[in-house]
Image: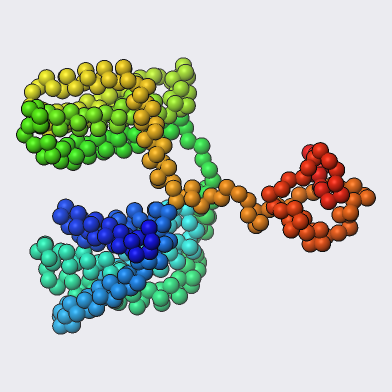
Amino acid sequence: MNDETLLIVAVGLCLIMVMLAVNAGFSAALGAFIMGSLLAETVQAERIEHLVRPVTDLFAAIFFVSVGMLIDPRMMVVHWFPILVITVVTVVGKLLTTGSGALLAGEPLKRSVQAGMSLTQIGEFSFIIATLGVTLGVTSSFLYPIAVAVSAITTFTTPFLIKLSPRFANWIERVLPASWLAAIDRYSRQTDQVRESSAWQVLLRAYLSNLAVFGVLCIAIVIGLGPMLQGLFGETVLGMNGQLLAGAATFLLVLPFIWAMSIRRIGLKAYRQLWVNKRQWRGPLVILELVRLGAAVVVLAVLVSVFFSTRWALLALLLLTALVAFLFRQRLHGFYVRMEERFLLNLNQRELSRRRSDLAPWDMHLAQLQVRPDSDAAGRSLQELALREKHGGERRPDRTRQRPHHFRARPR
């Protein structure tokens, strides 16, 4: 796409997501944030950012001007005490929470204090939240000017706190006991070390992530896409019941995910290690497999409750699922593998596009070469030889014939 089309598509996608978020009961900012996150992971992210920058500046100016016009200074004078209290709570609270989070993440004490004192402000997103609360009638009208006042005050105080953060960190180091400082330093070093996970940890993490991802996908397809298909088919389609056809179509769509959730083998190395270990009790492994099958039954039960009214439908779907999984397990496996590979390719497309297939001049490295004493290259520099200019970067030395200008690497 050219620049104009790409700009229109990017802005249009953001507005569409805003409309969907508002219709779903969320804020418009959330929709724009989600679509911005999606566009930021594409291979055109830098180009989109360059094209959208003027639009961003325009709407940012409009946003802040509109925010300033909605401020009532009289409300700020009346509610000065809540503004002062919330400002103190914001500065102290964000200093403690952000600094503690950095410490738990393994950062040193000084860096954690600097991070905490650098993030003691609230941004313009608080305006949006306050406006949404006032619009929905769930908060008082004076909350908006309080949020704006606290944001303005913390914005002005943040540079001074950043400037004071090194001295404040040094003061904390002098006040804290030596044993505490040693413990924090030891914890920071330990978090940088790579630890090996046990087989149970690897297996449980794989099973839980598999159940969470595919369980959510299955329920989303049944509850979200199923009624849409039912409305698309209507009451009857070619003399057949539209609800049954919608249920069958939803079942076919959700079947690969049911197979991946309940039957596909995951964590094979860890599972095999635990299964062949005679000192380990195999009961938990069997329970994990039963949990996976139970999750599939739950998904089918939800499908039956949405589309079918008979009690025997669940049993019929269970038998049909088992039969299809047995007869077409190879095709289901191949279809799922292709779908997963395509998903991972799209997910990592940005990183893959950055990889270069050919070596650039700055990718070269030094190597030791051995030449004959009577060679014309002896005693001459690489600039004087001009090998790249004479022979090109892609041409390789001819090993069948010895020429004075060809080098051969010393064998290792």
Residue under the point 79% across and 62% down: 383
202 on left or right of 407? left
Residue 128, percent from left and from top: 22, 66
Residue 221, percent from left and from top: 22, 37
Name the residue nearer the viewer: 130 or 61.
61
Residue under the point 17% across and 67% down: 131
Q: Quadrant of the N terminus?
A: bottom left
Name the residue nearer the viewer: 399 or 267.
399
Residue under the point 28% across and 72% down: 59
382 on left or right of 313? right
- Judge whether residue 367 can be spotted in this image: yes
Name the residue nearer the viewer: 31 or 205.
31
Please give the count of numbered marks on the rendered protein: 0
Name which quarter of the figure residue 230 lies in. top left
Residue 152, percent from left and from top: 29, 76
- Judge whether residue 88 can be spotted in this image: no
Name the residue nearer the viewer: 411 or 399.
399
Residue 72, percent from left and from top: 16, 80
Q: How is this picture coloured?
A: rainbow
Name which quarter of the figure residue 282 lies in. top left
Name which quarter of the figure residue 288 lies in. top left
124 on left or right of 383? left
Residue under the point 40% across and 76% down: 159
In the rendered image of this protein, does residue 366 appear above or below residue 298? below
In the rendered image of this protein, does residue 200 appear above or below residue 180? above
Q: Quadrant of the C terminus?
A: top right
